[in-house]
């Protein structure tokens, strides 16, 4: 060990992930516990990796002096944000993964066709048997679901691109991160449908452990409704969501919808097939995840999530 210089150890650390850094830090005091106020070797390695990152990535994980945050912890958050965006959670009716391995695609089941079959069977039974007062036609089957992204964004500028086939009543936006435990416990109960604008009591339970990271903004769920292009948002306290028009508002029925979230300026911008429409929402702060929502659609679609292009949002 004495033949390994600090520079050599730091060079080796540049090839490690955060789990490896932590394991090495536990082996001896030299690697994991600084004798003075200086950083340990593994902390120095993580610090150097963050400092060598592009400026927009460094802004994702700002260091706050006086907190218990470690450089290894910040580097771990940076690596998670570097990972390709995916749909880490899906809730509601009529939705499933197309590619389970990468969680990149979400699509709707042929729920509408199933409803049509049920309707035909009901009509056939109605002809065969007298209609009684207890006979009720099956209700119209529509999709009510959300897909939530894997990135938890709290600082800096982030972008995403959603690609969709033509579909009605689809929206893209941001939402507060859910507790993983709540998602796992309520996955089955949400199969009848899930709308974050209507399930306020569920939203309070789903986000309770992360509320301290929300900042001062009361915008807890906000999305771009592709038709007619309006901005819808909620604070999960009022009786209905707020619907706003905004400068540059346009509908987008198919193709690409891009979002640019600038948490340094508190703004969310919308792009349509690569063309900037404008800033849809101001006053954002705290943690958010990407969101895709379909509420009331009766036709099938496929949605793909990709990393978008970072462009200036500060207009």
Image (spheres, rainbow, N blue to C red):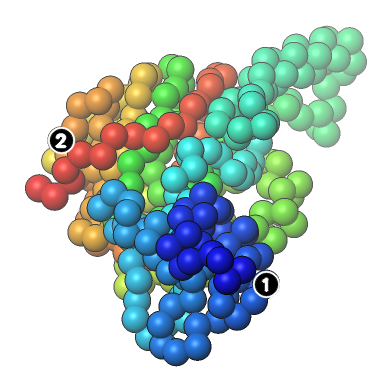
Q: Which quadrant would residue 270 be assigned to in this image?
A: top left
Q: Residue at x 72, y 54 (%)?
A: 184
Q: Disc 2 marks which residue?
A: 248
SS at mark 2 in the image: loop
Name the spot of residue 207 as percent of width and height, x first: 55, 65
Q: Which quadrant would residue 259 be assigned to in this image?
A: top left
SS at mark 1 in the image: loop
Name the spot of residue 146 as percent of width and height, x first: 55, 41
Q: Nearer the viewer, residue 43 or 170?
A: 43
Q: Residue at x 48, y 39 (%)?
A: 85
Name the spot of residue 91 as percent of width and height, x first: 63, 43
Q: Which quadrant would residue 237 be assigned to in this image?
A: bottom left
Q: Residue furthest right?
A: 129
Q: Disc 1 marks which residue?
A: 27
Q: Residue at x 24, y 60 (%)?
A: 264
The residues tagged by marks 2 and 1 sit, at their Cα atoms, a distance apart of: 57 Å
Is residue 260 left or right of 313 when viewed as pictured?
right
Q: Residue at x 61, y 68 (%)?
A: 1
Up/down of 11 relative to 104, above or below:
below
């Amino acid at each position: 060990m004495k033949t390994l210089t600090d520079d050599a150890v730091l060079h080796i650390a540049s090839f490690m992930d955060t789990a490896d850094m932590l394991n090495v830090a536990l082996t001896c005091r030299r690697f994991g516990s600084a004798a003075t106020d200086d950083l340990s070797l593994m902390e120095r390695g993580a610090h150097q990796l963050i400092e060598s990152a592009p400026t927009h990535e460094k802004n994702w994980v700002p260091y706050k002096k006086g907190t218990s945050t470690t450089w290894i912890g910040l580097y771990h958050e940076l690596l998670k944000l570097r990972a390709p965006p995916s749909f880490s959670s899906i809730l509601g009716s009529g939705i499933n993964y197309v590619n389970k391995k990468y969680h990149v695609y979400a699509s709707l089941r042929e729920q509408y066709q199933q409803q049509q079959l049920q309707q035909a069977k009901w009509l056939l039974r109605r002809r065969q048997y007298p209609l009684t007062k207890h006979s009720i036609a099956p209700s119209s089957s529509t999709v009510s679901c959300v897909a939530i992204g894997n990135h938890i964004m709290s600082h800096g500028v982030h972008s995403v691109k959603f690609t969709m086939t033509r579909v009605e009543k689809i929206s893209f936006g941001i939402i507060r991160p859910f507790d993983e435990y709540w998602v796992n416990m309520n996955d089955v109960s949400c199969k009848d449908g899930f709308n974050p604008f209507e399930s306020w009591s569920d939203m309070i339970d789903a986000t309770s452990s992360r509320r301290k990271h929300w900042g001062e903004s009361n915008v807890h769920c906000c999305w771009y409704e592709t038709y007619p292009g309006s901005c819808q948002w909620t604070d999960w306290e009022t009786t209905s969501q707020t619907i706003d028009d905004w400068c540059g508002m346009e509908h987008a029925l198919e193709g690409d919808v891009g979002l640019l979230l600038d948490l340094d300026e508190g703004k969310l911008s919308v792009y349509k097939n690569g063309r900037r429409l404008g800033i849809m929402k101001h006053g954002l702060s705290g943690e958010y995840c990407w969101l895709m929502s379909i509420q009331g659609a009766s036709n099938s679609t496929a949605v793909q999530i990709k990393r978008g292009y970072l462009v200036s949002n500060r207009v």
